[in-house]
Image (cartoon, helix red, strand yellow):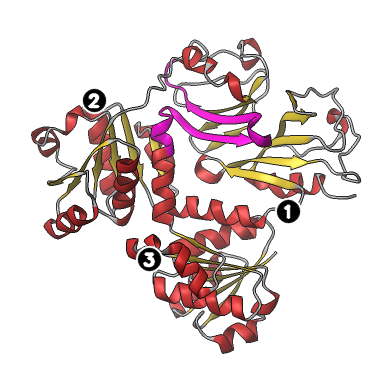
């Protein structure tokens, strides 16, 4: 696809990197000369210095031939104007990033007024993921495929009878498999002699109704928590609090800045707002926050969030989450014991990737740390793999066919199984080979 991005900040740069790795043609428009130089050096993309709100510049760059235009600057008004201009000039799809609560509350009206296809907030999307995690604590990801017939879900393994055993010796529930192991910075498509180690993030794929069998097998408790403490009245923190209120959680929000406390009190109707320091162990104890079953560190600073989440773990809070804006920090948070890391720019990028799906790819989910993806395909007549035996199909190393749905029946394929037209197939692949996997499902 031909994709334009306005803004070379953290979100725009991250998105440009991901889309380039996916094989798309990317143009980035950025008004700051220093950011232009940095991006031009770092990525193989077309970088243009100028304003994305200039209709003259957008015409010159050929935005009328653009399949997707995404405005990602830190200015909501500029993003809305740029996406609106791009749509008027002929861009097929347009997305505007916004951050302010006031704008997001009117997102549908703004999208209609500005003729923008979608308005997305990284902060709001992050809040959604936080709530999803709390609805299924212990599950890092939970995705449906094939109309809900197939589930993919990830556990972090801390204690289990499966530890240090070869996978070939593990008795999994019927119609399930281990599709991926993430260990630190390593992404492993497992074989029979691979072992699960303490702290591994393990992705399972299987029939949807088999998920509950894993609670006892892995000694994970999936009971929904009730009490949540949020550290930081940042935009992310406020979005999380608002959503938790609607989901009937008991919520406390801790913020050391009195002005932000006052703003939070105006926005939140059911949250107890406390003026205190969430990185102080004494403050956490004094404010009675140790009774919370969940602690979410959502300040504007990554280091404070990591520290606060670790303090929460040290004080015995069951589930501790941290909002982290630098994806490289996720390796550190996992090793230190933070239960789940929320990365706004990665979550935003994953939603943009959903807008770039080929006709053969029905759904995709970017997994933790963006090192792998789960994808659902339909096998069409004439596809390269149609009619082939799986062992002979030539899928790239670093990929795995995890499930086949044929006539609404799910089975875990073996190398002897054939791939037939109209099959719906669930694949797991390392990010580096995703494009090779996509090509397998296109016409030969």
Q: CA distance from mark 2 to mark 1?
A: 46 Å
User: Outermost residue toward the bottom?
Assistant: 56
Left or right of 208, for residue 53: left
Res 2 quadrant in image: bottom right
**Residue placed under numbered mark 2 in the picture:** 316
Q: Is residue 148 magenta?
A: yes
Q: Is residue 38 above or below residue 21?
A: below
Which circle's residue, 3 or 2, is located before the other in the chain? 3
Residue stretch in magenta: 132-159
Res 411 quadrant in image: top right
**Residue placed under numbered mark 3 in the picture:** 103
**Residue placed under numbered mark 1 in the picture:** 358
**Number of numbered callouts drawn:** 3
Work out which quarter of the rendered image holds the N terminus and state it: bottom right
Circle 1 Cα neighbour tier, 10 Å, few/some/many (<14 / 14–19 / ≥20): some
Left or right of 281, for residue 76: right
Q: CA distance from mark 3 to mark 2?
A: 38 Å
Q: Is residue 349 above or below residue 323?
A: below
Which circle's residue, 2 or 1, is located before the other in the chain? 2
Q: Position of residue 63 (x, y in %)?
A: 64, 78
Residue drawn where x is 44% and y is 26% of the image: 199
Circle 3 Cα neighbour tier, 10 Å, few/some/many (<14 / 14–19 / ≥20): some
Mark toward the viewer: 3 or 2: 3
Q: Position of residue 56 (x, y in %)?
A: 58, 89
Q: Position of residue 5 (x, y in %)?
A: 55, 69
Disc 2, SS: loop
Mark toward the viewer: 1 or 3: 3
Res 231 quadrant in image: top left
């Amino acid at each position: 696809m031909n994709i334009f991005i306005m803004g070379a900040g953290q979100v725009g740069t991250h998105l440009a990197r991901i889309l380039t790795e996916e094989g798309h043609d990317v143009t980035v428009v950025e008004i700051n000369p220093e950011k232009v130089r940095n991006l031009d050096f770092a990525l193989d993309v077309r970088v243009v210095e100028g304003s994305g709100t200039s209709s003259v510049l957008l015409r010159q760059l050929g935005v009328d031939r653009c399949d997707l235009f995404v405005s990602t600057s830190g200015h909501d008004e500029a993003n809305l104007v740029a996406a609106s201009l791009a749509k008027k000039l002929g861009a097929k799809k347009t997305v505007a990033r916004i951050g302010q609560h006031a704008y997001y509350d009117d997102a549908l009206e703004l999208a209609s007024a500005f003729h923008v296809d979608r308005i997305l907030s990284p902060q709001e999307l992050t809040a959604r993921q936080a709530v999803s995690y709390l609805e299924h604590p212990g599950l890092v990801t939970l995705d449906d495929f094939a109309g809900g017939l197939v589930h993919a879900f990830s556990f972090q393994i801390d204690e289990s009878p499966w530890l240090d055993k070869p996978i070939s010796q593990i008795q999994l529930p019927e119609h399930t498999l281990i599709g991926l192991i993430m260990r630190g910075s390593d992404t492993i498509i497992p074989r029979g002699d691979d072992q699960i180690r303490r702290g591994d993030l393990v992705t399972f794929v299987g029939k949807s109704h088999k998920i509950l069998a894993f609670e006892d097998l892995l000694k994970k408790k999936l009971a929904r928590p009730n009490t949540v403490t949020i550290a930081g009245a940042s935009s992310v923190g406020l979005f999380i609090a608002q959503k938790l209120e609607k989901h009937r959680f008991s919520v406390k929000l801790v913020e050391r800045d009195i002005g932000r406390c006052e703003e939070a009190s105006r926005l939140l109707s059911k949250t107890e707002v406390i003026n205190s320091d969430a990185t102080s162990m004494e403050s956490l104890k004094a404010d009675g926050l140790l009774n919370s079953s969940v602690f979410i560190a959502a300040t504007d600073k990554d280091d404070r969030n990591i520290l606060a989440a670790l303090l929460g773990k040290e004080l015995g809070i069951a589930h501790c989450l941290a909002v982290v804006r630098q994806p490289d920090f996720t390796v550190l948070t996992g090793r230190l014991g933070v239960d789940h890391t929320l990365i706004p720019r990665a979550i935003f990028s994953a939603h943009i990737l959903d807008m770039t799906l080929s006709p053969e790819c029905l759904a995709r989910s970017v997994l933790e740390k963006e090192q792998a993806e789960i994808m659902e395909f339909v096998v069409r007549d004439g596809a390269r793999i149609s009619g082939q035996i799986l062992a002979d199909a030539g899928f790239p190393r670093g990929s795995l066919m995890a499930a086949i749905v044929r006539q609404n029946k799910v089975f875990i394929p073996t190398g002897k199984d054939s791939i037939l037209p109209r099959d719906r197939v669930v694949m797991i692949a390392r990010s580096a080979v995703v494009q090779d996997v996509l090509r397998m499902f296109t016409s030969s």
